[in-house]
Amino acid sequence: MSEAVPLTGEPLALDLVNTRPTAGDLLATPGDLRSWWDLQADRLPDEAPQEVTAADLAAVHAVREHTARALDHVRRGDEPLAADLEALNQAQRAAPAINELAWNGSAVAATRRRDGSPGRRLAAHLAEAAAELLADPAVTNIRECEADDCVMLFLAAHPRRRWCSAARCGNRMRVARHYQRHKARQPERSRTLDEQPAVTDEGICCPGDGDPSP
């Protein structure tokens, strides 16, 4: 995939894990996290704060690392490390959510709210998303992109899906295969041309022989 733009559209926990591609880190700085926060705004309960701190980034990094390791085991049907599961539990406990009740003038309304700093609330929400995905039977349908240089994960809704993104890795790999096939045909085409009889003003030469035929 293009490593300049985060891949989105997968379950939120996968989108988080996919911010760490083959090279580099798409959440390397607090500013990167704020941009990703804005990108995922429709799936997150809180708006990104004006200033994202290093502590906010560290909390999200921790959830990402534990989620990635746990998913790597569970999607293969293996038992995850207890430490990774406990870390995700702790991240949720650090900013517990409640259904806050209030009278809106005509009925009781319940609003989901969390305590804690913006970064802790974000980390808790991401850990909750990871918990839901890890406990979902569909977790075994998570695959790694088949492009040679891509490690992005996706939840395959169709068994024939091979790429994290058809528009990114899919097209790129098809172009690469076409180039390799074209390149492989070039020597054969060259040999065919070399074996053709040479035509001169004096007659036809034997293949591979510079002297005219008698």
Image (cartoon, rainbow, N blue to C red):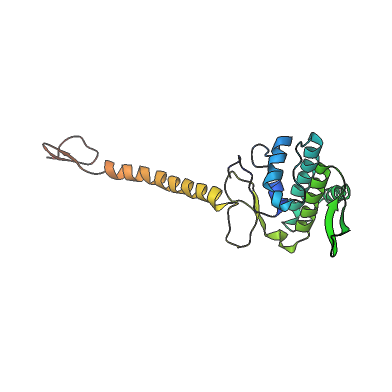
Side (left or right) of 125 relative to 186: right
Above/below status of 153 relative to 50: below
Count of numbered circles in the view:
0
Figure quadrant of residue 99: bottom right
6 lies above or below 157: above
Q: Position of residue 85 (x, y in %)?
A: 83, 51
State the residue at coordinates (66%, 54%): 10
Residue situated in front as seen by the camera: 73 or 22? 22
| Relative image position of residue 2 (x, y in whole percent) | 58, 42
Give the residue at x 82% y 36%: 55
Which quadrant of the rendered structure holds the N terminus? Answer: top right
Outermost residue on the bottom side: it is 107
In-image side of 176 versus 16 (left or right): left
Residue depicted at x 45% and y 45%: 180
Question: Where residue 29 sits: x, y (%)?
Answer: 72, 34
The quadrant of the rendering that contains the C terminus is: top left
Left or right of 105 on screen, residue 15 = left
* Left or right of residue 89, residue 11 in this image: left
Kindly identify the residue that appears in the image at 70 percent across and 52 percent down.
Answer: 42
Residue 131 percent location from the top left of the image: 80, 55
Query: Height in image: 47 above or below 50?
Result: below
